[in-house]
Image (cartoon, helix red, strand yellow):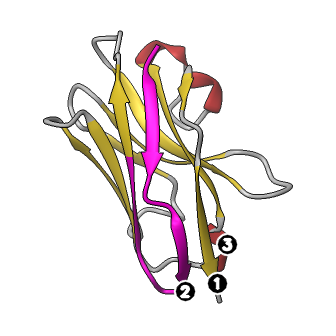
Amino acid sequence: QVQLVESGGGSVQAGGSLRLSCATSGRPFSDGRVGWFRQAPGKQREFVAAVRWSDDTTYYTASEKGRFTISKDNAKTSIHLEMNSLKPEDTAAYYCAAGPMDRGEYFQSRSYDSWGQGTQVTVSS
């Protein structure tokens, strides 16, 4: 399995920005996706963004596209999530996840078999 360690969470006012990072190690698959999910208290975990390791194809939800940008740092085997124009409803624990391409759709949590511990993002109004 892939080991994932998130960093970069914190507190910010609405309209502000944060950059999350996910350091990966032990990648066993030749191709796959690494991405971000988030979970707010009392809500289900939801997909945020992902990137395909082999060709940098990116995936977003409609609500995050334009505000969030996911990128891959090949040299450090890390991915980053740049979050701009943050809203209070973006408040959640953000989890980095990785999985092979053949487990399912990019937006499904069951498509990912490795998960980080999470980092908290809090946006105040």
- Name the residue at 61% across, 32% down: 108
Sooner in the amino-acid sequence: mark 1 or mark 3:
3
- Mark carried by residue 124: 1
Q: Nearer the viewer, residue 90 or 19?
A: 19
Within 10 angstroms of label 3, few (less than 14), some, or many (20 or more) residues?
A: few
Estimate the spatial distance between the alpha carbons at disc 2 and disc 1, rounded to whole Å.
Answer: 5 Å
- The span shown in magenta is 1-21
Within 10 angstroms of label 1, few (less than 14), some, or many (20 or more) residues?
A: some
Counting from the top left corner in percent of width and height, residue 100 is at 43, 17
The amino acid on which the numbered mark 3 sits, given as a three-letter code, is Glu
Q: Main secondary structure of the magenta part?
A: strand
Counting from the top left corner in percent of width and height, residue 53 is at 28, 29
Within 10 angstroms of label 2, few (less than 14), some, or many (20 or more) residues?
A: some
In the image: residue 14, left or right of residue 52: right
Q: Are marks 1 and 3 in contact (CB under 8 Å)?
A: no
**Mark 3 — residue?**
89
Which residue appears farthest toward the right when viewing the image? 42
Q: Are marks 2 and 1 in contact (CB under 8 Å)?
A: yes
Estimate the spatial distance between the alpha carbons at disc 2 and disc 3, rounded to whole Å.
Answer: 12 Å
Q: Quadrant of residue 17?
A: bottom left
What secondary structure is marked by label 3?
A: helix
Sooner in the amino-acid sequence: mark 2 or mark 3:
2
**Mark 2 — residue?**
13
Dividing the image into 4 quarters, which one contains the C terminus?
Answer: bottom right
Q: Quadrant of residue 31?
A: top left
